[in-house]
Image (cartoon, rainbow, N blue to C red):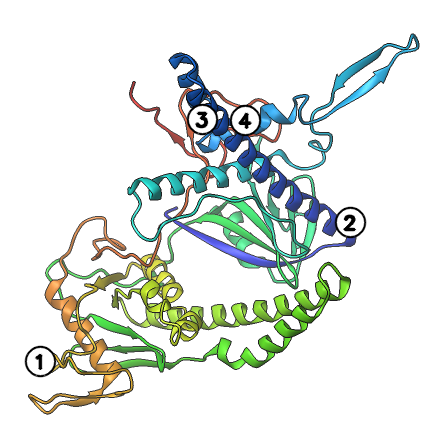
Amino acid sequence: MARHTTFRFCLDPTVEQTVALARHVGAARFAYNQCLRLHLDAREHHRTLGDSGADADAVDQARDAVPWSKFSLVNAFNRWKVSEAAGRRFLVTRGGVAEVEVTGLAWRGVVSAQVSEEAGADLGHGLSGWAASRSGKRKGRSIRHPRFKKKTPTGGSFRMRNKITRGYASIRIGDDQPRSVTLPRIGSIRVREDTRRLRRMIATRRARILQATITRGARRWWISITVEAADLHLAVQHPASGADDTTGWVGVDRGLHALVVAGTRDGTETLRVQAPKILATGVRRQRRLARSVSRKKRGSANRRKAAARLGRHHSRVRDTRQHFLHQVSNQLVKTQDRLVLEDLNITGIMSNRRLARAVGDAAWGELARQITYKQQWRNGQVVVADRWFASSKTCSSCGQVKPDLILSDRTYTCGHCGLVRDRDLNAAVNLAAWAEDHTRTVENGVGRGGVRVGDRQAAGPVINACRRDGSGPHIRVGETSPDDAGTPVQAAPAA
């Protein structure tokens, strides 16, 4: 098993299950906010001791007590939820003596403990990203400090790991009926789509469930099941190329007029897809729904209904765009084994107020991400051309650069050799030629023996929770264990 993939299904819960799902969403939000509050209180306590001139050892102990890592946040929340600060009640005996009974968090047994643990892991990931961005270790635009989550009628999610206990998985597919998924503390929930493909992969041991993320959308409840799956069949993988073979590259130019134009070095156009402009098509309806929300009184039921209608519209636009991008990326990776992408400064282009909406509607970054991981699954190769390579302004025949080319010029006309070619196709041909001239075969590339150049647009997988050796196993039911799927054991740092 060498790849991770996700199966996304639409849930069809009952009224009681909807309440249970909403309860888990609220528990995840509460745990995230409480972990953040514990972290900020510990930092404030350390700052107060430092300003008051306390003993250096006490200041160092307060600094070490600040929970920063994922597991330290989880442990801090677990200690807090059974403490007096989380809950207590007063008992009066027959003799009139009042006693305090520590109850802890009263509802902690109603929801799964994994929800709070995964929320603490998410906060730890956010804090590490903020600290790395602030210190300069993380490249790109700065990351803001994590903030408290708000309670909203729509939105929110929670995550559960698949715990294997005595050969019995906590997350199961098709347990009661084929179209169902079983979750801890919630039970079996019906799904709308067919789960036959995932059930067959699990039955034949070609897939293993790692975790499940349940999301409350604007219209429905969704579940995303992350699995560790076997490699694709050799029949659908691209044949391995020779170590000295530098031909066969196909340049992929992404634009606004034509979303994708693919071409080879000899000028052959292999694919052209027009941009659907999904957001621009529904912008009139979006503005009307947004005005309807602004006219309603804040806090009223009519405002909540109007906001729900606006959310459903955005959900339809997002789902339509995502479906279209998957179709385009599938068509590229199934027909071509070597693709060249251009390294676009999408963040900089989005700062242009005249192009921001169109660029966001095209979703160039998401398309590059899908092409990258899908080509890796098929043993293909993907490279990213240098950001400063002028693919659009360079003549694909003689190499002459035309600096006065503007966006409205849809046809490239070379004043040196007289070449007349479509602007997007000219850029795709230049990308293919760049790949043949600059790539080299390296080990551990995309696929087996693939070619890889640093890609800023396709981020790697995020490991949510990892446990160090010697950190101590959890013995309570529903809490983290070093043997859990998705929580690989990491070696302890050297002393």
Residue 346 position in % (x across, y down):
33, 65
Q: Between tags 3 and 1, which lies in front?
A: 3
Q: What distance separates the C-alpha of mark 4 from that of mark 2?
A: 32 Å
Closest to the observer: 315 or 346?
346
SS category of the residue bearing label 1: loop
Residue 344 visible in this rendered orientation of the protein: yes
Amino acid type, callout 4: Ala
Closest to the observer: 448 or 81?
81
- Within 10 Å of disc 2 (Cα), the crowding (few <14, some 14-19, many 20+) is few
The C terminus: image quadrant = top left
Q: Between tags 3 and 4, which lies in front?
A: 3
Q: What distance separates the C-alpha of mark 3 from that of mark 4?
A: 19 Å
Q: Which residue is mark 1?
A: 400
Residue at left 37%, top 80%? 273
- Within 10 Å of disc 1 (Cα), the crowding (few <14, some 14-19, many 20+) is some
Q: What distance separates the C-alpha of mark 1 from that of mark 4?
A: 63 Å
For marks 2 and 1, the one nearer the N-term is 2
Q: Which residue is mark 3?
A: 47
For marks 3 and 2, the one nearer the N-term is 2
- Within 10 Å of disc 4 (Cα), the crowding (few <14, some 14-19, many 20+) is some
SS category of the residue bearing label 2: helix
Q: Which mark is residue 16?
A: 2
SS category of the residue bearing label 3: helix
Q: Between tags 2 and 1, which lies in front?
A: 1
Amino acid type, callout 2: Glu
Residue furthest out toward the front: 52
